[in-house]
Image: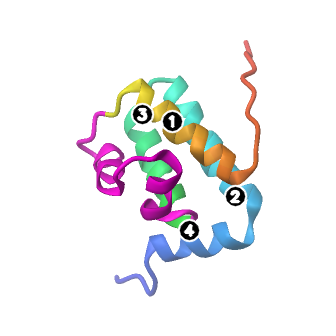
Amino acid sequence: MTLTRSFRETVKERAMRDPEFRIGLLTEAIECVLNDEINVAKVLLRDYVNATVDFQELGTLTQKNPKSLMRMLSPRGNPSLKNISSLIASLKEHEGIKLHVRADR
């Protein structure tokens, strides 16, 4: 069975019309980083970037080469904590949100 539209297009369309969905993608990715689910976090961050700012604009925001950012979030990418931190800081600033960590038992 073939899909009639790509997943990327569906995510982008939803992200454009639903700010809570965008924030959910970003916060879920950050939660995955905190829970050592780095591969899931990279997928979510890549989906968020593709649906919102794109890698060219992200390169401008982070002052990093867009291709380096793409490689960093690729399945084989191994981003440093400094690069992930810079990326997240730029994305939350772009989205206009502040994040707070809360511990639950």
Q: Residue at x 34, y 33 (%)?
A: 79
Front of the two marks 2 and 1: 1
Specify which label sits upstream in the sequence, 4 or 1.
Answer: 4
Q: Is residue 67 above or below residue 79?
A: below
In this picture, residue 60 sits left or right of residue 100:
left
Q: In this view, does 33 lie above or below 7?
A: above
Q: Residue 86 carries which label?
A: 1
Residue 26 screen position, x and y as percent: 61, 46
Residue 12 screen position, x and y as percent: 56, 71
Q: Which residue is drawn at 48% across and 64% down?
A: 54
Specify which label sits upstream in the sequence, 2 or 4.
Answer: 4
Label 1, residues with CA under 10 Å away: few <14, some 14-19, many ≥20 = some
Q: Residue at x 28, y 49 (%)?
A: 71
Report the residue marked by disc 3: 83
Screen quadrant of the C terminus: top right
Q: Is residue 56 magenta?
A: yes
